[in-house]
Amino acid sequence: MSAEPHYTLYHPRWYRRRVSVWWWLQKRSYTGFVLRELTSIFVAFFAVVYLWQLRALTQGPEAYEQFLARLATPLFLALDTVAFLFVLFHAITWFNLTPKAMVVRWRGKRVPDWLILGLNYAAWLVLSGAVAFVLLRE
Amino acid sequence: MPSSVALTVSRYRPERESEPTFQTYEIPFRKDWVVLDALNHVKDSLDGSLSFRWSCRMGVCGSCGMKVNGTPKLTCATFLADYVPGPIRVEPLDYFPVVRDLVVDLTDFMRKLKQVKPWIIRKEEKAPGDGEYLQTPDQLDTYKQFSMCINCMLCYSACPIYGLEPSFIGPAAIALAQRYNMDSRDEGAAERLKILSEHDGIWQCTFVGECTKVCPKHVDPAGAIQQYKLTGATNWVKSLLLPWSTR
Amino acid sequence: MDLFTCDVLVVGGGGAGLRAAIAVAETHPKLRVSVISKVYPMRSHTVSAEGGAAAVIKAEDSLDEHAYDTISGGDWLTDQDAVEAFVREAPEEMLRLEHWGCPWSREPDGHIAVRPFGGMKIERTWFAADKTGFHLLHTLFQTTLKYQAIERFDEFFVTKLLVDEGRCQGVVAIELSTGQIRTIIAKAVILCTGGCGKVFPFTTNANIKNGDGMALAYRAGAPLKDMEFVQYHPTGLPFTGILITEAARAEGGWLLNKDGYRYLQDYDLGKPTPKPVLRSMELGPRDRLSQCFVKEQEKGRTLEGPYGHYVHLDIRHLGEKLIDRKIPFVRELCLKYVGIDPVKEMIPVRPVVHYMMGGIHTDIHGATPVRGLYAAGEAACVSINGANRLGSNSLTEILVFGARAGRAAAAFAAEQAGASSSLAAQAGDEQRRLEEGFLRKNGGSERIAMLRAEMHQIMEESAGIYRTETALKEATGKLKRLQERFQDLSLDDHSHTFNTELTAALELSYMLDVAQTILHSALERRESRGSHQRTDYPQRDDERFLAHSLAYRAEDDSPRIEYRPVTITRWPPGKRVYGR
């Protein structure tokens, strides 16, 4: 039973529901959204690793070998895999949202969403292919 | 198909209680009935004290927005057949203060709507006798989608940012501002930019995208906001690099 | 009791009300104008209008043509001076709306596009896809936001007009969110509360169309004019009554009976052609089309479904592209509410109540016989619609006469002194009536839904498309008993906060009053004209009935019917001819 209401004639109290701290668990799409936002941490993680790699390069071949050895440890491999999955999730969710944010009009008509999406994914594939080609040439 | 279904409705009577409670009613199931028909059956035959808003019952006036099984919906366009065997839970929209039963207070939105100046702003107006402003069908197309907003507030009820930060201007208001910004007859984009790029404007939005999901008229307010962020950002860069051009 | 004051009070926030408020703000910027509405303005029923708004704009069109179409469409019961003013001011009003941002559909070169519409000889119906009313209302509402002088009382339910010293001086209203009774004193009041379609069981009208303003004016001593003229729209969906716009026929839709036959050709409406011909077949006037349905039903050539008889509206031959461009809302509504795609299947339709030609009697400036009381829109009867309204004239009417009433009310208010002193006492009486009659009353055996259903049955049976003397006479007696039983109403909700059962009861009392005026007016008009068809008097009788009926409230609360001649200027009464 609810407590006695504070009511004076013609002055009803409005009810304001508190937003729970766990609001983001209440709906699948909310949880997906929060995970998407969290992926930024893993993107930052890769950026830091990359900077660390550059630093190791400038310090000479032994430092670089040491760096590569650290990357091969099981802990780091696990971390890397998790981070990679999150960054993939990051890329896919943001690509899917691109047509919303970028409205391109050509000859007065709006370019359809699937075309914008397709072009983004195509560019990603081409660039990834080019990078892979360069790196795996040996 | 069952012959009846249970409707669990949120009740709030501020003169008697300090919190909402739930009350369940058994209503006949009809294939053609929408949730609104069920609520009207309750009001007409079971409990005349149930208060809710409704008017057109064809999805164009925006009065009957409520939560059905947790999702904001227009109850005049939500069929019972999609929810049987039930029970079906009907609650007032989230993130608005509840006045009574399923009725929420909308003054916050009304104030924000006025803030974004949703009218044609021009330096010089034509007299009606001078004829219409020309606007090609393609020009009409650029803003038409955003003009379809029926102010039903489902988007506000779906937006977690609005729930966490009630001062956020919100999806519908920004979509309507964008509707005027993109109208070829309007010249008020600069005036609206000031309001929209404030702290509670577009930058509060983190593109959750729920607003677009629940919008019954396919207005795509999330799209409107993201597109406007591009405009807002471009203007900010321009104001830094070429301060004289944005005056 | 709380007291507010303003100079001009507009009751009703739909197209007419908002246009009136803007007119006051623009012509008399120093006056304070308030708009009071029982719903938020963007919920007003103007929002559901679909087809379009008529105004002369094409070079081959002329004001006289528009006037003639309107006058003949109204079966010569229109006041021709009002029609002449209406067609003259229509184009300017519509252009003003365009300047305010209304997204009218366009020709490829950027000019306003027009479409054909029922009863019109030349295309002159402006449209915004098929959501014209929606765009019109939202444009008007958003435009009112820029005027500081316009104040709003949203969700205030007016229960009484305050009349003293022969002048209307304000209203008493319930503030819905708190239940407090408020008094608003004004120097002029404009009633823009819309029609009363909910008096009938099957209607395109929203729940809020209960004839509030009509009943308020009637109780305050103003007469209701031409109440017997109820328009049935030929194409509403069975069960829900949702409107399928006339534009579907204007773009080329066909009405087919159960044999797939375009039955309108049997009723002197022209010959069927593949493309629509104006003022012919499916583009005939609404009253004739609805009457054809009843005749087909009597011949057994309509289809029968779980919700009564219906016919088919076929738009399949228009093609998906045209449907999605010109009438997308029709497709949306059919998919949602009937579960059919009109691109591939035929739409089940039947006539449903749509519009009240009748209303509060006003002159061509929107003034009622009660000083200080004005009216505009569907709530008023000027009359430009006469015995039958042409589609797309109403949206223009609310703009033209909303502006006229606004200007006239503002001019009147600017010359008034203060309010009289007995208003507070009147308001106090009203508060007591509401408290004792509804909120604090215990016992009672009648239920709102029961009485409303019985009223619906009476109106459907006796005030339908075809009427007879005996049915009408019996109906007036039955309705009077309903009004007596209303006094014994019992409510479940005795609270103050947002009590919608109380407002439903008050709306029912308005509807009962208005229904009585419809029945009595229909009974006394012993002729057939336009949408009022008497099987016992099947001919038009210009000798006795080229006149408007005026329903006054008599001492015994029944309506007293008088007559007022129609104003004829340049178009003497002739035959109504369509399809030739």
Image (tube, rainbow, N blue to C red):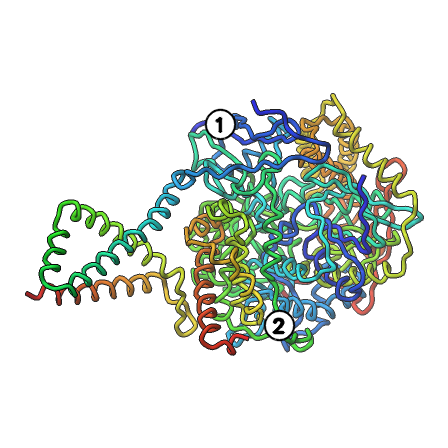
Residue B11, quarter of picture: top right
Give the percent coordinates (x, y) of residue A134. Answer: 13, 67
Question: Is C476 above or below relative to C574?
Answer: above
Q: Position of residue A118 (x, y in %)?
A: 28, 62
Circle 1: element type: strand
Q: Are marks 2 and 1 on the same chain?
A: yes
| Number of the front mark, 2 or 1 | 2
Amino acid identity at mark 2: Arg
The residue wearing badge 1 is: B6
Q: Residue at x 58, y 36 (%)?
A: A15
Check disc 2: other Cα within 10 Å, few if <14, some if 14-19, many if 20+: few
Q: Which one is earlier in the sequence, the residue at label 2 or at label 1?
A: 1
Tell me which amino acid carries mark 1. Ala
- Residue at image position (15%, 52%) is A71
Q: Quadrant of residue C265?
A: bottom right
Residue at horizontal 55%, vertical 41%?
A: C239
Residue C291 appears in the figure: no
Residue closer to the observer: B99 or C132? B99
Residue sitting farthest toward the right: C165
Q: Is residue A116 visible?
A: yes
Compared across the picture, whether B199 is left or right of C420 comes to: left
Q: Which residue is mark 2?
A: B122
Pick the residue in front: B197 or C100. Answer: B197
